[in-house]
Amino acid sequence: MIAASRSLTAAAGSALLGAGLIATATVAPMDVATPRLSSVAVELQASVLDIFTFPAWQQAIANEVEFVAIRAAGLAEAGAGLFQSVVALPETLITAVQQTFAGDPLGALTTLEEAGIAAAEATLLPYIAAQIDVGQIQLAIDSALLPAQPIALVELGAGLFAAFDAVARAVIIAGQNFVDAVLSLNIGNIVNSVVEGVTGVVTSIGTGGQDAVDGIVAAQTTLATALAARPVTILEAAAAPAAAVAKSAPASVTPVDEPAAAPAVSEIPAAADLDDAPAAVETPAEAADPAPRRTSVRTAQRAAAETSAADTAAPKKPAAKRAARAAAAN
């Protein structure tokens, strides 16, 4: 009896186990990806810390410190000029009195006026120059902030809009998937849609938060850059075109070889009579060495003498023949 009851119990248990396997065979296995919220926080941590650095405020404070330093330097220089003027005052007064007693009141007046002008320049000009420098910096900052403020507003709005868009799209997609899963009356699909929807929304929150943080940081950086603007001096503006011209100029210029001048040619006249001929032109070599010049002159004289002798001897031959013929005829 006991053995029979045991066999019935075992059969009933195996039947229930088989039924459970058959019932659960229709549900597909699920690969659930657990959302990792900690990774999103770590990714946003660096950018969030960048927000709290407040670069625009830092630059504004640095500007105020710079303004105070410029004014303090101007006041220090003005104080030094005032001290030098006070030290030089007794000597100036003595000089003016001496000029007055010497009968030069105009010179004394000129001395006092020059001393007063020098004291005013040494005392007032440094602080005025410091105020001008501060005013120029403030003007440059205002000019840079004029376009930077709307640009920063656009960057901030773009970041917030991107964050809202990412989260809104993820919520809508998760809701649509959940509704589709419920309408399918499938428990596995419902569970998958819930898990995927939560994962997508959490991921979109991380992405949207990153977009918002990027927009805030970009807006702050734009404002900080505008606050760091400084006036451009005239020397820097004039040096930029000169540097550009120097870079565009060729590195070297190839010199052009000029043709060599032809050597001077001296001509010596070949006339037989040196008395009527002009003086011979001396070459540099003949001027340096007189011996060849004397030789050439002698040679020319001999040739002229031989030519003149031949000319004089030629008419004498016909006269001698005529005399011989006349004697023979007689």
Image (cartoon, grey):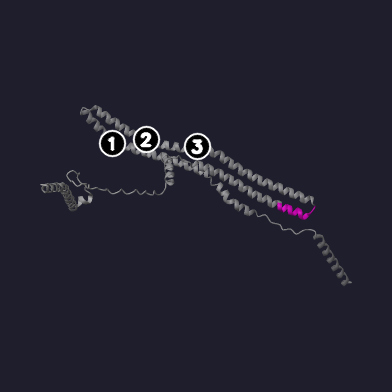
Q: Amino acid at mark 3?
A: Ser
| 320 inside magenta stretch | no
Q: Is residue 204 above or below residue 90?
A: below
Of the two numbered discs 2 and 1 in the rendering, the one whose residue sits closer to the viewer? 2
- The image quarter containing residue 36 is bottom right
Region rendered in magenta: 185-196
Residue 148 in percent (x, y) is at 54, 40
Point out the tag, 3 or 2, that comes first from the N-terminus. 2
Main secondary-structure element of the magenta-colored stretch? helix
Which is more N-terminal, label 3 or label 1? 1
Residue that mark 2 sits on = 125
Lateral position of residue 3 relative to residue 212, left or right: right
Identify which residue is drawn at 30% across, 35% down: 86
| Along the line of sight, the residue nearer the viewer: 327 or 116 | 327
Q: For numbered disc 3, what is the local secondary structure?
A: helix
Report if the CB atoms under discs 1 and 3 are less than 8 Å apart.
Answer: no
Q: Is residue 133 left or right of residue 87?
A: right
Task: From the image, tell me which residue sits under label 3.
Answer: 143
Mark nearest the camera among 3 and 2 is 3
Q: Position of residue 314 (x, y in %)?
A: 16, 48
Position of 181 with respect to 88 (left or right) is right
Residue at position x 55%, y 39% in the image = 149
The residue indicated by pointer 1 is: 88
